[in-house]
Image: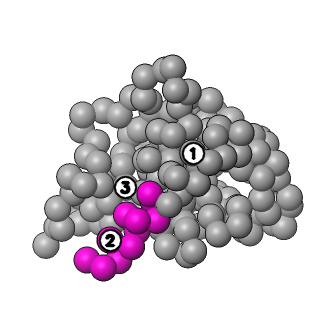
Amino acid sequence: MIRIAIAASMVLTVALSMESYGQHGFSRPLESLQVNQGFGWRLHPLTGLPDFHNGTDLKADFQPVFSIAAGRVLRVGANAISGNFIIIRHGKLQSHYAHLSRVLISNQDSVFQGQLLGLSGNSGRTTGPHLHFALSYCGIKIDAMAFLKALCPPDSPAFPVPSSVKTNLQYKKIK
């Protein structure tokens, strides 16, 4: 429970930091944002077992993926779960991009806000093409939903979240 409270407070901290930067310090990881799966406990769609989903899955069918902010590439790699992935450090914040079909940057590269990183895809363990986007703050995974909502222009409606996607506050611990 303490870890959840800490993570929730960090989401607030990141959201408040974004307000002070405005939209000039951050950009969207995709041109359009539509959530397929939120952060938190779920039944894994492939295994059917309880699983903590540490990111937000965004609808993306082999579309360009962009850096949310200036930073340095910590790791470019591939594994059986995440497929092709990128991790970028932006100070205390890290952004994670997974299931990519193509990676256009290398380890230790410096990237700028909005830089093209690669293409979304279907690599690793997935049910279909999408972008798994995750944030870590001081090494702890946080819910990216507030961050992503803050990237929507103030004069537009919030990005679409299907009713099947629960917010972090709606999740109950799965036994």
Report crowding for label 2: few under 14, some 14 to 19, many 20 or more residues within 10 A (C-alpha): few
Vertical relation: 153 (above or below) 104: above
Segment tinted magenta in the rendering: 1-12
**The image quarter in which residue 113 lies:** top right
Quick one: which residue is furthest to the top in this view?
155
Front residue (pair 127, 91):
91
Q: Tell which tag, 2 or 1, sits nearer the viewer.
A: 1
Is 106 positioned to the left or the right of 55 in the image? Answer: right
Question: Considering the image in quadrants, where does the N terminus appear?
Answer: bottom left
Q: Picture coordinates of residue 128 (x, y %)?
A: 45, 41
| Observer able to see residue 2 | yes
Residue that numbered label 2 is attached to: 5
Residue that numbered label 3 is attached to: 39
Q: Is residue 121 magenta?
A: no
Vertical relation: 42 (above or below) 67: below
| Observer able to see residue 76 | no
The label on residue 19 is 1
The residue at the point 37 percent across, 64 percent down is 8
